Amino acid sequence: MTEQRIRYLFERYFTDSCTESERLEFLQLIHEGREDDAFMEVLQDCWDIYAPERPMPEASGRRVLNNIIRPRVIRMPWMVGVAALLLLLMVSGYLLRDYFPHIKKTGGMPVAKTVIHDVAPGGNRALLTLADGKTIVLDSAANGKLAQQGDVKVIKMQDGRLGYEGVGAAEEEMRYNTISTPYGGKYQVTLTDGTKVWLNAASTLVFPTVFKGATREVSLKGEGYFEVARNASKPFVVKVGDMQVDVLGTSFNIMAYEDETAVRTTLLEGSVRVGAGEVSRALEVGEQGVWDKNGKMEVIHDADVEQAVAWKNGLIQFHSAGMAVIMRQLTRWYNVQVVYASESIKNESFSGSIPSSENISQVLKMLELTGTVHFDVTGQMVTVRR
C-alpha cells in the first residue's frame, strides 16, 4: 500500500468522513501490524493537523498504537481472531478517546461515530403481463394458480418459479405474455414446452402461452440463460432485435443489453446458429458469438463461459474487465446510478468474484483493495474516483 493511500485513510478516519469500506480497510491496515517510521510519520502528521490542541507524546502514542497494531490474534483462526480484535479495540477505546478526537462516549462506553452507506443486493423480482393486459407482481404474488389463459394455467411454483401448464391444442388464438425484471431483479420461468429461462436484471422476455406453427419463437431484451427442451421438428428461436438464435435443444446464454456494445451468445452445450439474414455462424460448445451494432459477426473460440453465466450461478464475476463494464453490471443488480469523477478510470481493468448476495459495499471494497480506485456511496448514487 502506498504512503499516499495510508495518509488518505488516516485523514478520512480522523475527520470521521470515511465510508464503511474505508473504515474496514483502515482497521485492516492497523491489524496488519504496521509500526515502521513511515507509518508513524503519517500518524504524527495527521495528529498535528486534526488534533493540534493535544500533541501526541512519542512514548504514549507508540504505546497506544501498539495496543492496536500488535494484537496477538493474527495466527488464530479467523473467527477467534476477529472476536479477540474486537475485544481489544473495546479495551483500547478507553485509552484512545483521549487521542482520537472524533471518538465519543455513549452510555459510558467509547464508540466511534460511523455512518454506513450501503446498498442491498437484488432478488427474485419480476412483473408478468398477460395477453389481456393484466399485470401480476410475481415477487409478492402467492404460490399457486395465478391465471387461466384458454387451456393453459399460469402457476407460481413452490420454489418461486413461474410455470405454464397445458397444451392448448384446441386453441387458434396466439396469446403472448411478457415477463420483465427491474433493475435489482431476476426471475426464472418454465415455458409450456418445458424450456427453462433465467432472466437477469433489467430484462424482458415475450413468449406465447402455447407454441404453434413450425417454430417456437420468443423475444429477448437484456440477458437470459436458456435450457431449451429438445424438439427436432420444431426449432426454438430467440429474437434479439434484428438478430436471432436458432436452436434445437441446448443450453446457452444471451447478453443483449442496449447499453452494451454487442450482443453476446455463449454456448454451453448442444449447437446454435447466430446471426441475421445471410450473415450467420454456427457455434460450437465453448464458443461465443459477438454481434456488434453494425451487424458484424465475430466468434470467440475460447470464450470465458464461466463468466458469461456467473450471474445465473449467483456470482458477480469479471476477468480483466474495464471499470465501465463492471459498473454497468453493478448498476443493473443493485439499482444504483454511477458517476465518474475521472473519465480515465473507466479504462482500468479488474478481476474478481464475489457472491451476488453480498451488499454493494463488499464488491466495492474488493475493487478498492487494488489501490487504484475509490468509491463514495450516497443513497443509490455511487461515485467512482481514482
Image (cartoon, grey):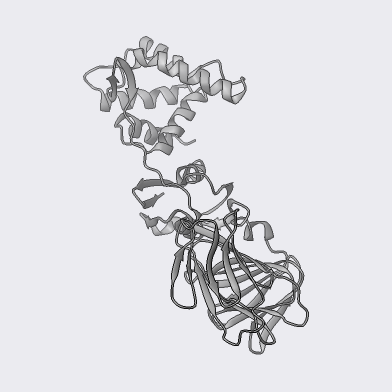
Q: Residue at x 53, y 46 (%)?
A: 357
Query: Does 95 appear above or below 36?
Result: above
Residue 138 percent across, percent down from the top left:
49, 60
Which is more toward the observer, 340 or 337? 337
- Residue 114 image offset from top left, x and y in percent: 34, 32
Determine the residue positioned at 38% across, 27% down. Answer: 42
How many numbered marks, from 0 up? 0
Tell me, yes or no, if residue 247 can be seen here. Answer: yes
Query: Do we see residue 221 in this rendering?
Result: no
For the residue pair 119 and 159, the one nearer the viewer reads as: 159
Q: Residue furthest bottom?
A: 278
Going by the image, does 332 lie left or right of 281?
Answer: left
Please report the residue visible at 60 percent of the width from the left and 73 percent of the height from the top: 152
- Compared to residue 4, the image places residue 143 above or below, namely below
Q: Which image quadrant for residue 43?
A: top left
| Residue 160 picture location, percent across and down | 57, 56
Percent position (x, y) of residue 158? 60, 54
Vertically, is 215 above or below 356?
Answer: below
Please tell me in which quadrant of the rendered image residue 270 appears.
bottom right
Is 154 situated left or right of 137 in this image? right
Say if 373 sits above or below 288 in the image: above
Q: Considering depth in this image, is 382 or 298 the residue closer to the camera?
A: 382
